[in-house]
Image (cartoon, helix red, strand yellow):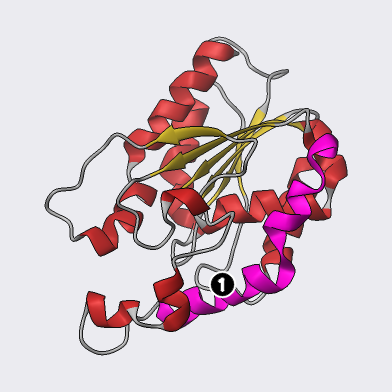
Amino acid sequence: MKSRNKEPTILLLTGLGMNYRLLYPYKRICNTYGWQCEIVENSSFSTDDIDEYSRKFASLVDKYENTIAIGISLGGLAIINALANHPSIAGKIQRVYTICSPVKGIHEDIMSLSLSKKIMSGEWPDLFKLKKLGKTFLEKKIYNKISLMKEDISSTSIYSYFHENDHIVPPEKSFLDNSVKRRIKYKYPLIPKVFHHHAACSDPRIFLEILNEINSDY
């Protein structure tokens, strides 16, 4: 196996309701290909402080000379927020990949709570957490912060994956203006559209696409 000791370390961040331990298989795949890989730990369901998740990510970035970050949903937002709060880390991040990440917010129906009626009778367990995430996003103005700092992160390439049927993070809310936009090509015909966000976020084929690209470019 080719040694990759001097090549970027891959950092993985998971999303809301996805415990970071679910990324262990992804880490093993990275290791199999010879990449050093670290997982940024989160508290699974907590959206109390996106800044804390971003701080953990920034601290991990500081330990390495070069990194590539892959963030799923909330994890991608944490990366973007980290670039806004700690722009000095941009020089150590060669690439960022976000997968269905709410970098410009979430669907308005979630903010109004009407989406719960479309999903099931009764309360959707994640709904209030998603609403809180949307409120947190609006209060912190993460997108505005990063948009004003383009010159500080120009060394970092951002690739944003979106799914056209995502009812939580619509395509127009899933990428920055300077992102390379990538439509997720996979279809989920047996899954209700309201759950296509979850399907895309947990689809290992997207991660493998990203990893194959990294393998080809480095």
Q: In which quarter of the image is residue 4?
A: top right
Q: Residue furthest left?
A: 190
Indicate whether residue 128 is drawn in magenta: yes
SS at mark 1 in the image: helix
Residue 96 pos. (x, y %): 62, 36
Q: Which of 107 and 19 is in front in this view?
A: 107
Residue 63 showing in the rendered view: no
Residue 116's place in the image compared with 210, above or below, is below
Residue 134 pos. (x, y %): 56, 72
Q: In which quarter of the image is residue 118?
A: bottom left
Majority SS type along the magenta span: helix
Query: Crowdedness of circle 1 by 10 Å Cα count: few (<14), some, many (20+)?
Result: many
Question: Which residue shows up at 26% across the image and 37% down it?
Answer: 186
Question: Which residue shows up at 62% across the image and 13% down it?
Answer: 3
Residue 146 pos. (x, y %): 75, 49
Q: Which residue lies furthest to the bottom in this view?
A: 122
Residue 215's place in the image compared with 174, above or below, is above
Question: How many numbered markers are drawn?
Answer: 1
State the extent of the magenta-drawn residues as a range.
Answer: 127-152
Question: Which residue shows up at 62% across the image and 52% down it?
Answer: 40
At label 1, which amino acid type do we have?
Answer: Leu
Residue 131 showing in the rendered view: yes
Residue behind mark 1? 133
